[in-house]
Image: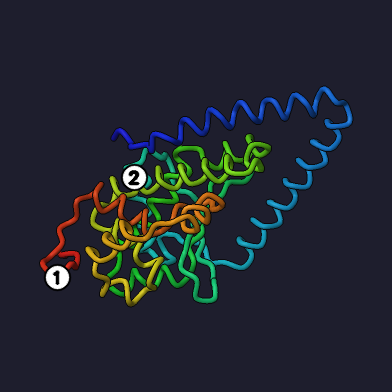
Amino acid sequence: MKLKVYPKERFYLFLMFIVSAIIYAILILSGIGIMYLLIATIFAFFAHGIFIGSIRGNSIRVSDKQFPEVYKIAKELSQKIGFEEVPLIYIMQSGGMLNAFATKFLGRNFVIIYSDVLELAYKEGEPAVAFIIAHELAHIKRKHLTWRGLLYPAMLVPFLGPAYSRACEYTSDLIAAQLVPDGAIQGLTVLATGKRLYQKLNILEVINQSEEESGFWIWLSEKFSNHPNLIKRINRVYYETKVVIDSKGYQMQ
């Protein structure tokens, strides 16, 4: 399968390389900058290690014996996307938040799913869960986690870092929509309305809203964000997947 990539991702990645190379060169040539770079690297390594340790010590690992339905989804998606093995998947309590994220440490890939998202798998929402998992697997496949670590100096540059992150999110949406077209709209709308109301969402009205909601402050808020506006993401995957909508604006099953 040839995976789709949001065009601007490669452009922003190129800029990130240039900016990071310049910053690294300045730090190295300054002499004392090497010390700061080393200290920052060590601090980031231990901070991330502690973070991973906390996840592994306080979350439930998914396997063929623990939440097997979720593991089956992840295994099938991993095979489709070209992974030789399934990344380590953990379920974490999040106090009602609906999300998931991927991370990497010492060469191992992790996908963390917030517990409320997992409940969807047991309430006729497996396509939505599959899309969310596929989105995180896409981040790993495209090496977004690796690039962000290596190009961290550029990530701190105003507008550039967030622009690259938003492009990565669009790419992951596109890939996840390729893998789970039936769950693309559901997977995003559940983040907007919650694990119950998303099934009642009028998709056509959301699309209309995305085309009507504009203005300076909406534009500016997105430029400072690492994620594209959610309504825009729903709009994009709607036109990408061409899901079938009934006359009342609801997705047909």
> Seen from this angle, which residue lies furthest right?
32
Residue 22 shows up from this direction:
yes
Determine whether 118 is above or below 134 in the image. Answer: below
> Seen from this angle, which residue lies furthest front?
216
Q: Which mark is residue 174?
A: 2
Q: Nearer the viewer, residue 115 or 233?
A: 233
Image quarter of the N terminus? top left
Q: Position of residue 17 (x, y in %)?
A: 59, 28
Q: Which mark is residue 108?
A: none
Badge 1: residue crowd in 10 Å (few <14, some 14–19, many ≥20): few
Residue annotated with mark 1:
248
Q: Position of residue 109 (x, y in %)?
A: 53, 46
Q: Position of residue 18 (x, y in %)?
A: 61, 26
Q: Amino acid at mark 2?
A: Leu
Residue at 30 percent across and 33 percent down: it is 2
SS type, badge 2: helix
SS type, badge 1: loop
Determine whether 134 is above or below 126 in the image. Answer: above
C-alpha gap between disc 1 and disc 2: 26 Å
Asked which quadrant contains residue 64, the reply is: bottom left
Q: Nearer the viewer, residue 133 or 30?
A: 30
Q: Amino acid at mark 1?
A: Lys
Residue at 64 percent across and 37 percent down: it is 154
